[in-house]
């Protein structure tokens, strides 16, 4: 994202309302967010849909990377189970859920 320009990129809500079309065009062109203020305090951030999508994708990648780091740590500490044990655990959980559902409704749910 290009450098933030406080003199251009921080505006009041009242100014935002009167210049909405310009703000939309500006964020799409510059790829800089606009910080909206109320009573002199920052309250919201306005950015283009394309930039939102890009930032959302980056967050998802960061979360996936964090999950990988956690999994690596668990593997390094020997905190893993075999595929066979995992499949058994899933089967046991489904059977338990089916028993619980049957006791509530008298019917068995599909596994």
Image (cartoon, rainbow, N blue to C red):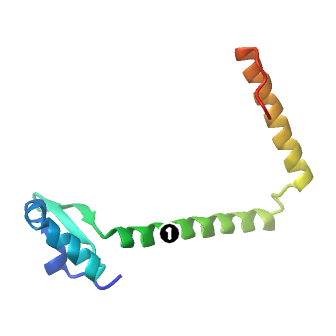
Find disc 1 in the rendering and name its residue.
Answer: 57
Relative side of 41 to 78, left or right: left
Q: Residue at x 80, y 65 (%)?
A: 75
Q: Up-down: is 81 above or below 59?
A: above
Front-most of 72 and 15?
15
Image quarter of the N terminus: bottom left
Residue 76 pos. (x, y %):
79, 68
Q: Quadrant of residue 53?
A: bottom left
- How many neighbours does mark 1 have within 10 angstroms: few (below 14), some (14-19), or many (20 or more)? few
Q: Residue furthest bottom?
A: 3
**Residue drawn at 31 percent across, 79 percent down:** 31
User: Does 12 appear above or below 94?
Assistant: below
Label 1: state its secondary structure.
Answer: helix
Vertical arrangement, residue 67 with respect to residue 109, above or below:
below
Q: Quadrant of the C terminus?
A: top right
Q: Horizontal placement of 104 versus 19: left or right?
A: right
Residue 5 in the image, given as x and y percentages of width and height = 21, 82
Q: Position of residue 47 (x, y in %)?
A: 29, 69
Judge from the rendering whether residue 63 lies leftward or rightward of residue 91; answer left or right.
left
Is residue 45 left or right of 38 when viewed as pictured? right
- Find residue 90 and report its horizontal and vertical position in percent: 81, 42
Identify the residue at horizontal 81%, vertical 58% (top origin): 79
Q: Residue shown at 22%/70% (left/top)? A: 24
Against 40, residue 111 (above or below) is: above
Q: Which residue ends up furthest to the right in the rendered image?
A: 84
> Quadrant of the rendered structure where residue 33 is?
bottom left
In this view, the residue in front, 66 or 13, is: 13
């Amino acid at each position: 994202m290009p450098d933030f320009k406080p003199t251009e990129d921080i505006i009041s809500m009242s100014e935002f309302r009167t210049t909405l079309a310009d703000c939309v065009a500006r964020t799409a062109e510059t790829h800089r967010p606009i910080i909206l203020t109320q009573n002199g305090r920052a309250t919201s951030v306005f950015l283009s849909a394309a930039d939102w999508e890009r930032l959302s994708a980056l967050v998802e990648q960061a979360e996936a990377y964090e999950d990988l780091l956690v999994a690596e740590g668990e593997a390094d500490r020997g905190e893993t189970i075999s595929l066979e044990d995992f499949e058994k655990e899933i089967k046991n959980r489904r059977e338990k859920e089916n028993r619980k559902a049957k006791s509530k409704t008298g019917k068995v749910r599909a596994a």
